[in-house]
Image: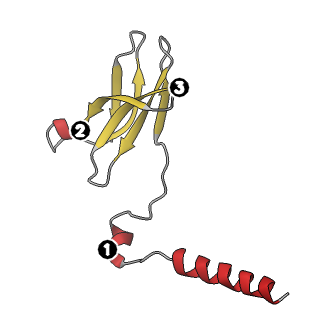
Amino acid sequence: MNSKHFSVLFLFLCFTVFGQQKISVEKIYTGAFRAQGMDELHSLKNTNQYTVLNEDMNGEQQIDLFDFATLKKTSTLFDTKNYSKDLPNISSYTFDTTEKINFTSF
């Protein structure tokens, strides 16, 4: 019975020591604890792929191409860091019948 109590106490201490993360004001305001999610997802009609609109910590946006079978990123179709900083944010995008990108910005 004594070893059972010791095991429980040991596990509790391990979880409290190793489960803590250093939190700072800088980490909070730089987005370190921001929820991960997908802003925009579109399936392509002619392939087994889909695209996702992503935004990094610097505010740059990318439209990335992923494979349904492997769920791995295969390429980046559009990246705002390759263009002028005056480019407006992308709020949405669609594909026409030939699967060319049409942007909506705000």
Q: Is residue 33 above or below residue 86?
A: below
Look at the numbered disc 3 and give the secondary structure of its residue.
loop
In which quadrant of the rendered image does the N terminus lie? Answer: bottom right
Nearer to the camera, 79 or 11: 11
Q: Position of residue 42 (x, y in %)?
A: 48, 27
The three-letter code of the residue at mark 2 reads Thr
* Mark nearer the viewer, 1 or 3: 3
Q: Residue at x 44, y 65 (%)?
A: 33
In which quadrant of the rendered image does the C terminus lie? Answer: top left
| Distance Cα–Cα, label 3 vs label 2 | 25 Å
| Distance Cα–Cα, label 1 vs label 3 | 37 Å
Q: Earlier in the sequence, mark 1 or mark 3?
A: 1
Give the residue at mark 2. Answer: 80
| Distance Cα–Cα, label 2 vs label 1 | 25 Å
Nearer to the camera, 88 or 26: 26
The three-letter code of the residue at mark 3 reads Phe
Q: Residue at x 41, y 77 (%)?
A: 23
Look at the numbered disc 2 and give the secondary structure of its residue.
helix
Q: Earlier in the sequence, mark 3 or mark 2?
A: 3
Give the residue at mark 1. Answer: 26
Mark 2 touching mark 1, by CB under 8 A?
no
* Label 3 neighbour load within 10 Å: few <14, some 14-19, many 20+: few
Q: Is residue 56 above or below residue 48?
A: below
Nearer to the camera, 71 or 90: 71
| Snapshot colouring | secondary structure
Give the residue at mark 3. Answer: 68
The three-letter code of the residue at mark 1 reads Glu
Horizontal side of 47 relative to 4 (left or right) equals: left
Q: Earlier in the sequence, mark 2 or mark 1?
A: 1
Look at the numbered disc 1 and give the secondary structure of its residue.
helix
* Mark nearer the viewer, 3 or 2: 3
